Image (spheres, rainbow, N blue to C red):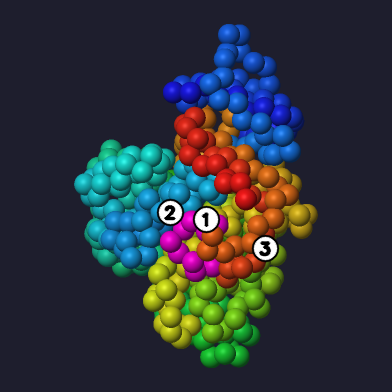
Amino acid sequence: MKTIEIKNGRIIDHANKIDQLGSLYIARGKIIALFNKPKGFKADKIINAKDYIVCPGFIDLSCRLREPGQTQKATIASETKAAASAGVTSLCLPPDTQPVIDTPAVTELIKDKAEKVNYPNIYPIGALTQGLRGDKLSSMVALKSAGCIAVSNANAPLDNLVILRRAMEYAAGHNLTIFYRPDEVSLSHNGCAHEGLMATHYGLPGIPEAAESIAVAQCLELAELTGCQIHFSQISCKRSVIKIQQSKKYGLNVSADVAIHQLHLSENDIEPFNSFYHVLPPLRSKDDKKYLQEALANGTINAICSDHQPHDLDAKLGAFPETEAGISSLETLLPLSLRLVENHILSLPHVLASLSSEPAMILGLKTGSFTIGYDADVCIFDPQKKWKINHKNWLSSGKNTPFWKHTLKGRVIHTLQKGNLIYTLEKT
């Protein structure tokens, strides 16, 4: 395994309170030193990072790869290439694959495919219930033993709160985190847009904020009862933020993430006949968007995820409510996150922590920072480089992004995973 020196870069590691120019030294796939060259160190490869940011590789808490099961949309091979180009060195795969990640065999299949494409840091999230049907608990301990990093029911509803309570009790007893995407399905049923002026004007079925915030409140009550560690996935509205903020104040073991598009788009941006804006949870009001930004800034929301959901063309054809929800968002994760800095919402170190050290803490991973001895997962990017999204530079199989043909600022130059160089931007 090569020894690598990354020199002349601006090294930012919020977890270790580092933000200064210098060099990073890598050997045997690990971080071995910062700034001062180790005695006798000889680099097999030197990367000049002058004018670039050097930061821990990003950890994506929700990323659909569409394999196994939906290879007409994307594959593990295609989407891990997109992840590498986005500076993402670890990603969590929700359990709603086909077949569902509810047995050790499916978990092992995914990890085997990850090894074959030389992207080992895929972390399957096991199904909370068998087949995600919501009625019978899965064998969570067996899933954990097979390599699942957490458990979740993805976007599928649970039959009742007793199932959720039993799942929490079981998970708490085996030190498993539950990833919970809050949605009271009786309220959100068949909705496709935020219940507001835009949905009313265009006659789109609405989803009220209460569908999410009521589910958050119920989950928090049970978390307090059971002591289970809960991570709320893809929070979208002000009322949910307030409830999570209160729960943290009173010491509950909870965390939360927000999808990057929720921090930039609101219901006002939706083009009613453009299904690329069809996401779940839906794009909310401007007030909700602002509150999400503030919640990320004050630490109520811990992390940013891509909520990457690549689709084939057919999935996005038809009337807005009839199309499949989701955005292909891996490759816009960094530039849209940097826009939060440009708009003075967050500092650059805080944004990078939301993509690296904070997700690592949620998952209990020894990565996401440049702590000596940690895996050398590194992202090197040019914060000033502008690029226009098009077919030539887009690597994901899913082209379903509302930012298509937009010019963005911020481009990954190199990505290293466990000390291996897995991406280098081609010179144009």
* Residue displayed at 54% across by 80% down: 274
**Residue pointed to by mark 1:** 330
Q: What residue type is labelled 1?
A: Leu
Give percent across and percent down for residue 48.
66, 31
Q: Is residue 360 above or below residue 323?
A: above
Out of 261 and 311, give the one closest to the viewer: 311
10 Å crowding of disc 1: few (<14), some (14-19), many (20+): many
* Residue displayed at 64% across by 22% down: 34
10 Å crowding of disc 2: few (<14), some (14-19), many (20+): many
Q: Is residue 233 above or below residue 91?
A: below
**Residue pointed to by mark 2:** 79
Q: Do the residues labelled 1 and 2 touch (CB within 8 Å)?
A: yes
For the residues labelled 1 and 2, the Cα–Cα distance comes to 8 Å
Q: What residue type is labelled 2?
A: Glu
Q: Element at badge 3?
A: strand
For the residues labelled 3 and 1, the Cα–Cα distance comes to 16 Å
Q: Are marks 3 and 2 in contact (CB under 8 Å)?
A: no
Give percent across and percent down for residue 339.
70, 56
Mark found first going from the N terminus, 3 or 1: 1
Give percent across and percent down for residue 212.
51, 68
For the residues labelled 3 and 2, the Cα–Cα distance comes to 22 Å
Mark found first going from the N terminus, 1 or 2: 2
Q: In this view, does 218 lie above or below 250?
A: below
Q: Which of marks 3 and 2 is in front?
A: 3
Give percent across and percent down for residue 94.
38, 55
Which quadrant is home to the N terminus? top left
In this picture, residue 113 sits left or right of residue 80: left
Q: Which amino acid does label 3 sit on?
A: Thr
In this picture, residue 115 sits left or right of residue 297: left
* Residue displayed at 32% across by 61% down: 71
In the rendered structure, which segment of residues is drawn in magenta? 393-401
